[in-house]
Amino acid sequence: MSYSTTVDHEEHHDHPSGMLRWLTTTNHKDIGTMYLTFSLIMFMVGGAMIMAVRAELFQPGLQLMHPEFYNQLIGVHALVMIFAALMPAATGFANWMLPLQIGAPDMALPRLNNWGFWLLPPAAILLTLPFTLALFGIGDGAIATGWTFYAPLSVQGGIGVDFAIFAVHLLGISSVMGSINIIVTIFNMRAPGMTLMKLPLFAWGWLITAFLLIATIPVLAGAVTMLLTDRHFGTHFFDAAGGGDPILFQHLFWFFGHPEVYILLLPVWGFIPQILSTFARKPIYGYKAQVYSLCAIGVLSVVVWAHHFFTAGMPVPALLYFMYSTMAISLPLAVLFYCWIATIWRGSMTFETPMLFAIGWIILFGIGGLTGLVLADVAADAQYHHTYFVVAHFHYTLFAGGIMGIMAGVYYWLPKMTGHMYNEKLGKLHFWLTAISFNLTFIPQFFLGLAGMPRRIPDYALQFSEFNMISSIAAFTLGLTQLLFVYNIVSCARGGKKATDKVWEGSNGLEWTLPSPPPYHTFNEQPVIR
Amino acid sequence: MARLRITRIWQCLLGALLPLTAHADYAWNFPKPVTPMALDTLQVHNKFMIIVMVIFVVVLGIMIYSIVMHRKSRDYQPAGFTGPSTRAQLFWTLVPFAILLYIDFILMGIPAFHSVVAMEDTRTDADMVIKVTGSQWRWQYEYMDGPAKGISFVSNMTTPQEQINNQAAKNPEYLLEVDNPLVLPTDKKVRVLLTSSDVIHNWWIPAFGAARDAIPGFLRETWVKIEEPGTFRGQCKELCGKGHGFMPAVVIAKNEEDFNAWATSKKAELQAAAAGADKEWTKEDLIANGKGIYEKNCAVCHQVGGQGLPPAFPALTGSKIATGPILDKDNKMVKDGHLDRVMNGKGVMPAWKGILNDTEIASVITYERNALGNSLGDMLQPAQVKAMR
């Protein structure tokens, strides 16, 4: 194999080093690393925000902050976690692993890739800057409308809304750039012999995600632009007094917002089977069924948007349509669950950290999925809607199903990326503390929601005290536990036991045929798939 | 020995938790339903929960079995299958799919259909109509027909700020108490019309199962048929700005006789208050009366000290409107002047003429012009307000 001897030769290549390397790089691995680092930083920022919120909710009464500031924290927490933590993490993996997995030397459009990343930091600054500006008496802080920007509240809001609108524009452009790159790479750069039906599932998950992003991000961009003109240029898109309709905003927003949920999760659904297969030492079960299910979910996700605002009032046929189509998503999703479980069934399992996260992920994401099925029922949804039941449900899908999945991926590929093994004991500790404190945080919230606690309230009635206290304590534990994660990643990047090329006994796929870490230019000789 | 220690830890943990359960008000499910819709919702919810629990336990059971049995440390040899290969296997892969299809569209789908149709049917056999208007951050109730027809009032939260700021012990109904609860008759189908004067709110009382957005510029509707007398409490549940957590909705359900008696006395009370318009008031009385009205109705937005919350809620201190002329030289209302704004509203400022009576409007305007850092020295008589209606 020719690539193993090229490692030293790589060093002589003429590419910048130090800071300039990172600023100007078009190398998919460098950009992937930047995406992942950015994501980790923003994950901690978003986490710190919600720690403050949980501290406020520790007891009834207002202890730490004004309701206005509280609303800003919950809104920016969501925007940061979705756009600046979860999405860049998935894009980071795509940049790192897609070329490796499909036998390509790099991404197809490297310069676009560089731009895609460098739009993110300014967007993150735009999101968080209003907090700082408010300290100096400029404006009244960040966006305080929740992440959904619902008009007319957002029309009425302060300068923070404008900042958020521009941040969303930048994030959207970045996502569309990333998506174009991924689609072009997958369609054009596959190694000879790698047909679409031999594509790794991670690539499939991302391919569908990329199409969803290109289909829906422009709708969000349009919606927030209309909001901007309503705010400053005298239009009345969302103002009934001028002939507009506030519910129009919700339709536009959720036409993006619902697929967004799947945009966050589809890449994870792609690599989880690979992890399960590796540690069960058994091939992926039902590859084709999974591909078709991923496609079906992609299509269904764009036709169910209105289930997010059943209580806004809709004609009965619309309610029924959105109810049944939402329930229908459970079918392809159930196929995926079936395949994941059949993949570990009669395997020869070991339980390294990535496997622990992957199995924990199936169970916890299962809770998120099943409670989502309940939410689809219009009649029951009137009770669940905008309560902590929904908060708990979507944290089971987005934290357990999204972020814990990403963590599985991090531990799975970290030795490949850094060339060093991470600390397995710390990794396991991280998993168990995360899983336990996560459940203790959000199970009480299911009950809070059923008992009638609305979400996004800074203070609550006395009957909700005990569960909130439990939830807060567990949330602090969950937050602090993530410091272990950061420590483990940083120490792994700085050194440690050398990782072998194959890293995991049961791993298969092109990325494991390369040295750890892979050479700067991934494949000098194109692999051939038979 | 180890087992003993674990038992002891368990006992300590339980001991630590026990005092918590002793007086904690844990609620594990929806509040007791008092309307057909809430009962229906609870039943749907319970049924659904059982189904998803069963699915979860079965799937988890299969996974745990596999995790315990099929592990490398037990030297289990991995199988190599990648999909169903025999007809029997194919059958068993399709069974879960079929079960789910059955649950989604038959077992739950059909009752859900009927629930939705019943939920949306606000008009059949409706006995009375009320209108609920949400505004930042209070509810306004209007009786459109029936014995209480014509009654309208504003419902504000009454929890004192000291309790919210933890400077005083909290009432048992902390954050769920109002000055003017909505009173409804039991066993009558009440059609509830909802709208809003500023942003989207959501009128929600968990025991009723009815939750519907109140949307500015549009009418939305739902219905309740309360089956037992009592006091039922809920909150706004659509994020509506800084006061979102402080916008309770309280309904007192009375039987028909008590409801009629309440309607009669409430009408008399409102009439007596309106009669105040015919008497000549002193400035001091108007200011004193206006203070309470301001703090109840205006302070949530314009703040107790009148400094406002720009940009949505302008300051009243030194404001052009609140210090400008009220009436022009022909004794007509100045367009966009102080009285016009209060009476007819503008933008997110609600029109108060339907909510406050003449005395209240005159008092609050006089207060705003002679307090909150303003000292114009003029005043407005209730009779003048009455003349402008």
Image (cartoon, coloured by chain):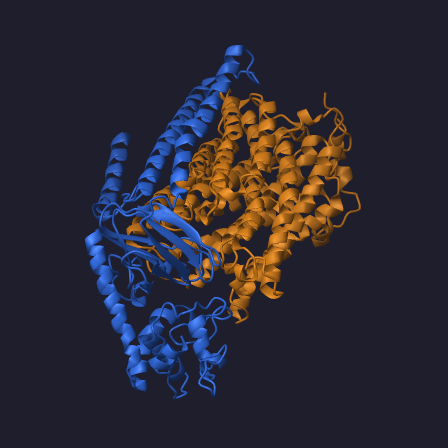
Tell me: residue A529, above or below residue A241.
Answer: above
The N terminus of chain A lies in which quarter of the figure?
top right
Q: Is residue A157 visible?
A: no
Tell me: residue A169, above or below residue A91.
Answer: below
Q: Is residue B22 visible?
A: yes
Judged left or right of residue A73, residue A277 is right
Picture coordinates of residue A44, whole percent (x, y)? 51, 51
Going 74% across and 51% down the picture, which residue do you hit? A24
Picture coordinates of residue B95, whole percent (x, y)? 47, 19
Q: Quadrant of residue A197?
A: top right
Judged left or right of residue B172, residue B83 is right
Picture coordinates of residue A52, whole percent (x, y)? 43, 56
Picture coordinates of residue A399, whole percent (x, y)? 48, 42
Between A380 and B334, the one nearer to me in the picture:
B334
Tell me: residue B222, above or below residue B306.
Answer: above
Going 37% across and 52% down the picture, which residue do you hit? B192
Going 52% across and 43% down the picture, which residue do you hit? A306
The C terminus of chain A lies in which quarter of the figure?
top right
Tell which chain the image draws in orange.
A
Tell which chain the image draws in blue.
B
Judged left or right of residue A132, residue B143 is left
Tell me: residue B110, above or below residue B278.
Answer: above
Number of numbered discs = 0
